[in-house]
Amino acid sequence: MQMQVEAERRKRATVLESEGTRESAINVAEGKKQAQILASEAEKAEQINQAAGEASAVLAKAKAKAEAIRILAAALTQHVRGPWVGMGTGIDSGRGSLIYA
């Protein structure tokens, strides 16, 4: 009878040890999985931030070019219209000619 009790204890100890090993392996796997997910999310956030920065740079450059074009157009308009305003000749009137030296 005592041998049966001892055999049952060893069997339970083996089962408990096996379950402990299994739980430990599951915890390690879950930890690796979570670490991989976090690394992936961090990489995604980094790519989003980089893309947003590049988009801001492109937008700033486009705005600067647009402003330069606006300033140039205003200067050209002022230069072309300036001396002939009110004279009835020039580009706007459809008569006369402009000669630049």
Image (cartoon, rainbow, N blue to C red):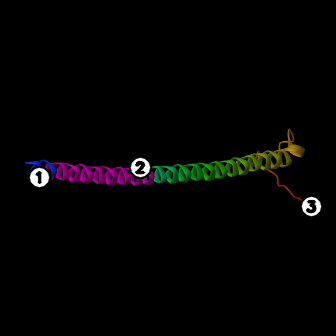
Task: Give the residue number, with chain letter if any, for mark 1.
Answer: 3
Q: Is residue 38 left or right of residue 6?
A: right
Q: Nearer the viewer, residue 99 or 5?
A: 5
Can residue 97 be seen in this snapshot?
yes
For residue 65, the mark is: none
Q: Which residues are magenta?
A: 7-36
Q: Kindly identify the amino acid type of the residue bearing the numbered disc 3.
A: Ala
Q: Nearer the viewer, residue 5 or 64?
A: 5
Q: Nearer the viewer, mark 1 or mark 2?
A: 1
Residue for badge 3: 101
The residue pinned by badge 2 equals: 34
Residue type indicated by callout 1: Met
Residue 95 in the image, given as x and y percentages of width and height: 78, 50
Above or below: residue 50 compared with residue 88: below
**How far apart in space, not on screen, are marks 1 and 3 (Cα)?**
121 Å
Point 54% across, 54% down: residue: 47
Q: Residues within 10 Å of mark 2 (few under 14, many from 20)?
A: few
Q: Is 34 included in the stretch rendered in magenta?
A: yes
Q: Earlier in the sequence, mark 2 or mark 3?
A: 2
Kind of element beneath mark 3: loop
Asked if residue 64 lies left or right of residue 44, the reply is right
The three-letter code of the residue at mark 2 reads Gln
Q: Is residue 54 magenta?
A: no
Residue at 92% x, 61% y is 101
Indicate which disc, 1 or 2, sits on the residue closer to the N terminus: 1
